[in-house]
């Protein structure tokens, strides 16, 4: 039985991860900023209302985990927001900063405090949620893309630093994943490009070899693998779960 923390774990990909680890018999603790969704977590999954981009709250969370669980085996740094959709010449600096704060600062803060808890134990696994936008880039999504490229660089550095202490770090790079967030992204992109949402969605799917969008469970299954002993020699890797994207501008 592993002790697992998932940031932004009360909905979407994070909740799929939480359910998957719980189904495997692990102890699961999630954070989220949505009080209602934290209150509605499935029985047996512990939740805390914490913003991953604000260090005081995260520091207190890790102190609670150390006190109640004595340590952590797996940390999924999953918190993120879609950020603004706009041409670079129209980009609002405040929206840029907010997107980087949640997607990149939150990942760093999570890894920082996970390392402090895992290093004395001499083992652990940190899984970052990046994106295929962090591998290829995406038009009209500059803040999100910059943050997700940054997450991959952060992950590789963390893997190098913590590997000698028995701690692995990897990043999952989902493509377009079915759910409310991609619906919002598609609507915003359709408006920016003068297209219909259905046309944008079709373009996303047709730009993959498998011709379909991913589901949250596809990402959760990769997290289970990376956290397992079967992946004991997998570290420092950015692994796409996207049906092989080859056209990033539908």
Image (cartoon, rainbow, N blue to C red):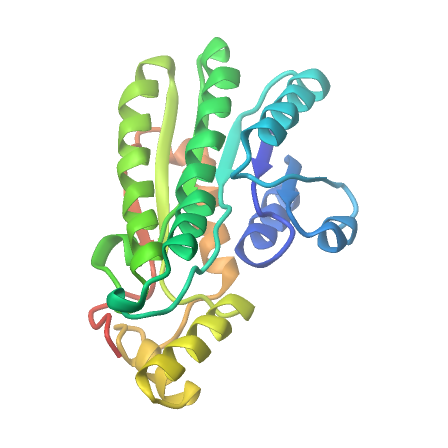
Figure quadrant of residue 190: bottom left
Q: Nearer the viewer, residue 188 or 76?
A: 188
Give the number of marks: 0
Residue 169 appears left or right of 13: left
Percent position of residue 208, x then y: 28, 73
Residue 6 appears left or right of 138: right
Q: Against 164, is 238 above or below?
A: below
Q: Against 222, is 82 above or below?
A: below
Q: Is residue 132 visible?
A: no
Residue 135 appears left or right of 141: left
Q: Against 108, is 176 above or below?
A: below
Percent position of residue 137, x then y: 23, 60
- Residue extending farthest to the top is 120
Q: Quadrant of the N terminus?
A: top right
> Which residue occupies 25% across, 73% down?
209
Figure quadrant of residue 199: bottom left
Q: Nearer the viewer, residue 58 or 241?
A: 58
Q: Against 155, is 71 above or below?
A: above
Percent position of residue 126, x then y: 43, 32
Q: Quadrant of the C terminus?
A: bottom left
> Which residue occupies 64% across, 39% down?
50
Q: Is residue 108 visible?
A: yes
Percent position of residue 246, x then y: 20, 69
> Which residue occupies 39% across, 22% down?
167
């Amino acid at each position: 039985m592993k002790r697992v923390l998932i940031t932004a774990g009360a909905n979407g990909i994070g909740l799929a991860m939480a359910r998957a680890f719980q189904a495997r018999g692990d102890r699961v603790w999630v954070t989220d900023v949505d009080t209602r969704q934290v209150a509605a977590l499935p029985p047996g999954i512990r939740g805390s209302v914490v913003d991953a981009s604000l260090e005081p709250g995260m520091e207190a969370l890790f102190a609670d985990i150390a006190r109640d669980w004595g340590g952590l085996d797996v940390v999924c740094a999953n918190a993120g927001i879609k950020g603004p959709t706009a041409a670079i010449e129209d980009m609002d600096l405040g929206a840029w900063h907010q997107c980087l704060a949640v997607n990149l600062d939150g990942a760093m803060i999570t890894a920082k405090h996970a390392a402090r808890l895992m290093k004395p134990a001499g083992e652990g696994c940190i899984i970052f949620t990046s994106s295929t936008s962090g591998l290829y880039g995406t038009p009209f999504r500059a803040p999100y893309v910059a943050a997700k490229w940054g997450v991959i660089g952060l992950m590789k550095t963390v893997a190098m630093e913590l590997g000698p202490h028995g701690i692995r770090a990897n990043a999952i790079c989902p493509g377009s994943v079915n759910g409310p967030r991609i619906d919002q992204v598609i609507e915003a992109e359709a408006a920016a490009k003068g297209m219909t949402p259905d046309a944008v969605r079709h373009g996303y799917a047709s730009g993959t070899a498998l011709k379909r969008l991913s589901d949250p469970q596809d990402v959760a299954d990769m997290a289970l693998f990376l956290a397992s002993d079967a992946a004991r020699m997998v570290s420092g890797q950015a692994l796409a779960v996207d049906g092989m994207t080859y056209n990033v501008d539908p």
